[in-house]
Amino acid sequence: MPASSALRRSLAVIAALPLLTLAACGYGSKAEDDGGAKVAAGAKKIDGLDSVKIGYFGNLTHGTALVGVQKGIFQKALGATKVDTATFNAGPSEIEALNSKSIDIGWIGPSPAINGYTKSAGKNLRIIGGSASGGVKLVVNPDKIKSLKDVKGKKIATPQLGNTQDVAFLNWAAEQGWKVDPQSGKGDVTVVRSDNKVTPDAYKSGSVDGAWVPEPTASKLVAEGGKVLLDEASLWPDKKFVITNIIVRQDFLKEHPKVVEAVLKGSVETNKWINANPDAAKASANKQLEEDSGKALPAEVLDPAWKSIQFTDDPLASTLNTEAEHAVKAGLLQKPNLNGIYDLAPLNKVLKAEGAPTVDDAGLGAK
């Protein structure tokens, strides 16, 4: 459904807001050595590189990174080139870290990847692989919201202005015929931008009536008495949509292609292991979350959250293009030129070597 007239009127004013966030948001990630893996005796550095810096979020939707680090799969693939990790709370800060060369490769959601690519006129990053699909839900207070139409007039949290879930909720609200100012979040429904770490407390206090959030935040809200009103996967063809991509600095890809290929090999091996060993993988991801944040997830949160995520090497490129269209319709982005955002040649090389099907860039590959 076309964006509302209010959204169209505000488009020119706020189109660059998510992009400006990249500069405004501070880089406060936690950088650390990968303590979960040891360099094998006799291993050699790839391309003579001492280390590769990898970034990811403390979300289960970044489970490939969590498990690959925890199990030492990335370190094994990289030989004596040491894995250094950094964790982030939001996409803009990870993009800032990529731009400043504080990280080389990152796991990230589609909206920050789109914003980072367009802000740099296609010069700072490439998407080089997929990681996960799904794991996003609208969870509400069942005493206040009993049906989808009851969301109108309520306060719904999203993680950040212009982030992937914020775009998805604004698009969904527009499709209901509701008018929302994307900058302020005010309108027929009030959008409250709230860090995933504090959203459960905001829900408990009654500051918000629900939230459109990724896992494990969604399941944390359910554990607090919330009800899943909508699984975002139900809105997509085949119930698949990209929630996590792998990105790399273009200069790093050019200078260290063998290192990038090794990380992708580790990612493919990790996803294969996750899908073959879901319970062990779930425990591994939780252990890494505990090491990164100091707190593991309880079973009542971990179990349902993990079940809702599909781990895949496919970047689901066609859905990235659709998500960009949603951001434009919501008034958060001018129509972007995404040509060249993907370089899937290294991943497809790894997949061919594994005897696995190659993946497609939906016509948005680097020439």
Image: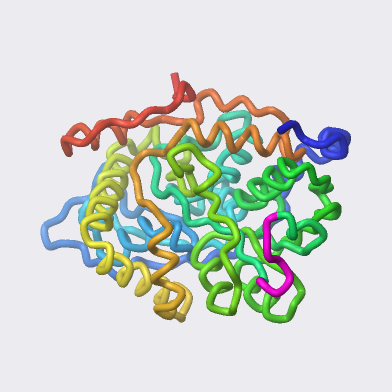
Residue 213 picture location, percent across and down: 59, 60
Coordinates of residue 12 in the picture (x, y in percent): 84, 33
In this rendering, the answer to whether 161 lies above or below 316 is below
Which x, y percent locates residue 199?
65, 71
| Quadrant of image for the N terminus | top right
Q: Can residue 22 be seen in this view?
A: no
- Observer able to see residue 63: yes
Q: Which residue lies furthest to the left in this view?
A: 42
In percent of the image, x 58 and y 53: which residue is there?
91
Give residue 51's quadrant in the image.
bottom left
Q: In this view, does 33 lie to the left or right of 211?
A: left
What residue is rendered at 43% in x and 36% in y?
A: 316
- At horizontal 65% and vertical 67% (from top left) the residue drawn is 140
Question: Which stretch appears magenta?
Answer: 142-148
Residue toward you, 49 or 78: 78
> Which of the image's four quarters has the C terminus?
top left
- Colouring mode (rainbow / by chain / secondary structure / one colour): rainbow
Above or below — where is 246 with respect to 324?
Answer: below
| Residue 57 falls within the magenta-colored stretch | no
Q: Please name the predominant secondary structure of the magenta segment in the image.
A: loop
Q: Residue 147: say if magenta.
A: yes
Q: How many labels does the image show?
A: 0
Q: In this view, does 205 lie above or below 130?
A: below
The residue under the point 53% across, 56% down is: 136
Give 164 or 188, whichever is nearer the viewer: 188
- Counting from the top left corner in percent of width and height, residue 169 is at 67, 50
